[in-house]
Image (tube, rainbow, N blue to C red):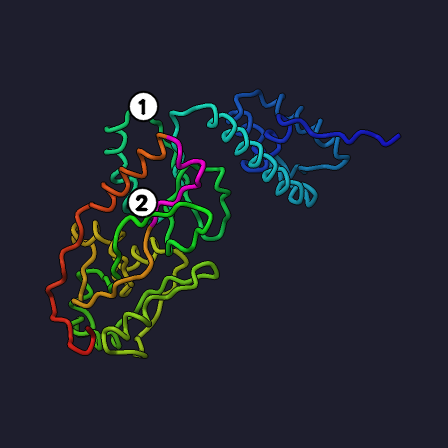
Amino acid sequence: MRALRRLPSMSGLRAFEATARHLSFTRAATELNLTQGAVSHQIKNLEDLLGLKLFSRDGNAIRLTEAGYEYLASARAALTEVLVATDRAIERQRGDILTIACLGTFSIKCLIPNLGDFSRRHPSIGLRVRTLSPSMHMAPQDYDVSIQYGSSEDWPDMIARKIMREELFPVCSPALLDLNGGLKAPSDLVRHTVIRTASPFILRDDWPLWLERAGVPGIGFAGEISCDLLYPSYQAAMEGLGVAMGRSAVVAADIRAGRLIEPFSIRLPSSLGYHVVIGEERAKLAKVQLFCEWALERLGGAAPLPAPSRLAIRPDAA
């Protein structure tokens, strides 16, 4: 008869993960609201079950053993899966919590600054915002509604509604206008650093398309800085490090506040944009319908950027 497999206790895994994170029994005990002795006992039981040492002592300090490092990754993954599944099960029984998954830059620049309006209109709906990352997959069942970037064809099995029309154009710090001869025309970019947003997960670079529209395809730059996400790209531009390619939806607030400026009056209409994306089953929920209607009205109707007037668009760039 095959022996039953032994499983570690959840309390043991939590004690191990917290101790490994803090490298302190005392801090782990404080976090878990346990005594230091209880944490030590949980880890001792886990080590006995595994038949190996997870920590070693170095004077008054502790450190993970090689086996401890290997086990930590699995323990964290298991805890995360259980926590997510528990949250999901609880939320299915509650109709008053709306979980929104949103891309980080749009969340910071557009969603969160306006989310108070949704709460005022629908005070009975609690909110949970989760960040979508290009490098991590989040299963659709882990949220009620998402805000994602692309074209409506990118989500064939979902309902996708575009929030607003989008335009692409360079943005930079006002201080950059006084450096390296300024930015009076797109050809002046040869004296400036450009900031690209590119990573193994973000394959699109909007600079070549905009340069073609501006009539200077293939132009060289004085330098380049590459960021893996939009938010650090725009922050780098605000710090005066270079010129970034802005998306109208997420740079609007910074332009109105004067943190960024649009040096040229040449915009490239984008075929892509931010969409509210919903699974068919979730779309039937009242809280999701309320959010979708609100997002299209509030986020889509948020004060749009006025048409640029700094420079006239060149005939060959129209």
Mark 1 or 2, nearer chain start: 2
- Counting from the top left corner in percent of width and height, residue 100 is at 38, 38
Please name the residue that numbered disc 2 is placed on. 108
- Counting from the top left corner in percent of width and height, residue 210 is at 28, 70
Q: Residues within 10 Å of mark 2 (few under 14, many from 20)?
A: some
- Dot in front, 1 or 2: 1
Give the alpha-carbon distance from disc 1 to disc 2, as whole Å.
23 Å
Residue at point 24% right, 46% down? 300
Q: Quadrant of residue 40?
A: top right
- Counting from the top left corner in percent of width and height, residue 163 is at 29, 48
Side of 86 relative to 1 (left or right) = left
Residue at point 71% right, 26% down? 45
Secondary structure beneath label 1: loop
Secondary structure beneath label 2: helix
Which three-letter amino acid code belongs to the residue tagged 2?
Answer: Ile
Side of 191 relative to 134 (left or right) = left
Residue at point 20% right, 65% down? 176
Which three-letter amino acid code belongs to the residue tagged 1?
Answer: Ser
Please name the residue that numbered disc 1 is placed on. 124
Quarter of the C terminus within the rendering: bottom left
Q: Which residues are magenta?
A: 275-285
- Counting from the top left corner in percent of width and height, residue 109 is at 28, 47
Contact (Cβ within 8 Å) of mark 1 with mark 2: no
* Residue 185: in magenta span: no
| In the depicted structure, whether residue 226 falls above or below residue 90 | below
Quarter of the N terminus within the rendering: top right
Q: Residues within 10 Å of mark 1 (few under 14, many from 20)?
A: few
Q: Quadrant of residue 53?
A: top right
